[in-house]
Image: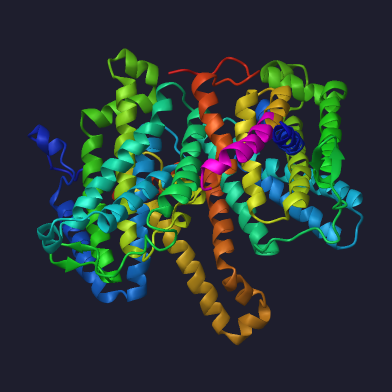
Amino acid sequence: MGYRPCGVYHQYYGQDHAWWQTKFVWGKMIFLFLVVFYLFPKFAGLYMVSVFNIVGYTILAAMGVQLLIGYCGQITLGHAAFIAVGAYTSSILMLQVKWPAFLVQAGLVYPISVAAAAVAAGLWSVLFGLPSAKVKGFYLIMTTMAAQFITVDFIITQYVSQVGGRGSYFSIPPGTIKIGPWVIDNDMKYYYLASVLVILCTFVMANLLRCKIGRAWIAIRDNDIAAEALGVNIVLYKLLAFFVAGAFGGIAGAYWITNLFFVSPEHFQFSWSLWLVGVILIGGVGSIYGTIYGALFMTLIPEALKALILFLTGSEFVLNLMPFLPLLLEKFLYVKEAAFGLAIALFLIFEPNGLSYRWWQIKNYFNLWPFSY
Amino acid sequence: MELFLQLFITGILVGSIYALVALGWTLIYKCSGVLNLAMGELTLIGAYVCITFYHWGIPFVLALIFTLVVGFALGILTEILFLRPMVGEPVLSVIMVTVGLSFFFKGIVELFFGTDTVVFTPTVFPIEPVYIGKVVVGQVYLWAFVASIILLLAFVSFFKYTKWGLSMQATADDEMAALSLGVNAKVVYALAWAIAFMAAGVGGTLLGNINGLNISVGYLGLLVLPAVVLGGMNSVPGAIVGGLVIGVLQNLADGYLSPFTPGGVKDVFPFAVMVIVLLFKPYGLWGWIRIERV
């Protein structure tokens, strides 16, 4: 919200609560829509579009983590489990169930499976959120970690993956994923799907946060005893937070199977859960922008790093100067992991409020620039 | 019955390694209140340092001692660089710093040592098994048990009888009072990390001797979490008993439940136990009963 320009007054409550309060912001947002849906896919290369698919997936996946950690104060280190549940629910529904022909014709199978994935992942998340009724802090972290190991490493790896014979079942034949008349089968279409889903989820999340439910969550985060004294049903709202967060995770998982040709548990490891928490920590805890900035940062910086190393390896001179560069490229995955760990630690030490706070500061500075008094 | 005894004894022997690593974890938590999720990577680093020394031709015992020295230095360095600026920050931030550290260490290890399984060549311990009654035990397990018991005793007597150990105990008990009595808290924190690094390093080395060394040793280091939760997070005897119990339970589950499942019970069972403990007895066996309840 920030500052309004001089002479802009609100006459109604609705104006006061509008997301986009001025014409300028409206213009900015319309421009953003234009960029996301027209300019970017048109002018960026196919590779950049595929990178942004990962960004979209990260945003969707981190949304639930942001809700739990940033808004409800329930620390979760097992969110990949719920994403996995979403992905597997969606793919099982699409591949296993005999759908009536008219649904298949109309291309409704995938949308239905996405909704089902959201519900299933939400319920699964509630199951592991139940201990939050009893414990908090570190003990809750432990139970969410247990959720990760029990769900992904045990139930999915050992049982669910066996459905229909190990290794053969969860490959998704091309052309299976259809929304209405559109077959989702290339990077460009994944990109549009991701954009739509991100916008929808952000919309839902932002609206949830400014109504009664969101205020209850924030009250629980800030002081749960005071919240209870004020009549917030803590257990109910915590479980609701787990449900909604799990549902976001389920949607993320159901989206990600479009990008995969083969669903397997390796995509939903513990490190992915930690990565998501890192995303919101770097982006900013307790801010929807933070999720988006964090996802952009965490995906684009490694890409930029890779591009830089690639560029440097191209020149003979630099190669003589730093002969270890090709090796670095070969082991880029590990470099990325180490750099990411270091980035989390350094962000927490030097900028604990994350990128979104820094961005807000910069915006405020330039809002009044050059006369900041 | 024989199967039970076999599983039980193997469990105790492996559990002693967990106990060693869990001891390091508990120390950090007791002294500085940091919940360390990088424990698995500490075991990895120690193990790789030791195997590097060993492959240079240094005798195993000497390599182990060098590992302790390196672990000591790394522990103090880590504390000064990453944990000291975080004193007084919210719990989540501190935990996430350790998560960041775990990624960092893992990346570094993978970068320098690769991800292939390496084994100690020539093998450190003889391969011939030892018969205790009807129970067959590999010598590796036996020696690992002996080594961990020796180190456990060394660490425990360090706490009980030396000045630094006592000041660590004092800090763990009441930081403010310890500070006012002239205990240098910075040194205590650094020392706690150093000991954790040392214990984890030895634990990792022993685990690496049993099954060969690769990234998954870091996962075994994660098993200390169920152990410490079971023992009560701020209790040293709790950590030791918790480690042993988790080792035994893991092996029993492997022996008795595996026939009924496709596999993988061994890895998950400790965490299932942990959830149950958390639900019914969140402060563990001997932890201080001051867990915040909702």
| Residue A371 visible somewhere in the drawing | no
**Residue drawn where x is 69% and y is 61% of the image:** B117
For the N terminus of chain B, which image quadrant? top right
Which residue extends farthest bottom?
A: A316
**Residue drawn where x is 27% and y is 76% of the image:** A43
Q: Choose top left, top right, bottom left or bottom right for residue A194.
A: bottom left
- Which range of residues does the magenta coloring cover? B245-262
Q: As displayed, is residue B279 above or below residue B57?
A: above
**Residue drawn where x is 82% and y is 47% of the image:** B140
For the C terminus of chain B, which image quadrant? top left
Q: Position of residue A368 (x, y in %)?
A: 30, 48
| Residue B241 visible somewhere in the drawing | yes
Q: Is residue B246 magenta?
A: yes
Q: Give the dominant element type of the magenta stretch: helix, strand or loop.
A: helix
Nearest the eye: B90 or A363: B90
Q: Position of residue A220 (x, y in %)?
A: 35, 25
**Is residue A49 rendered to the left or right of residue B156?**
left
Q: Is residue B258 magenta?
A: yes
Q: As displayed, is residue A286 above or below residue A345?
A: above
Q: Choose top left, top right, bottom left or bottom right for residue B170.
A: top right
Q: Position of residue A100 (x, y in %)?
A: 13, 56
**Is residue A142 rendered to the left or right of residue B294?**
right
Q: Choose top left, top right, bottom left or bottom right for residue A5.
A: top left
Nearest the eye: B173 or B252: B252
**Residue drawn where x is 54% and y is 61% of the image:** A336
Q: As displayed, is residue B204 above or below residue B59?
A: above
Q: As displayed, is residue A197 above or below residue A226?
A: below
Nearest the eye: B208 or A167: A167
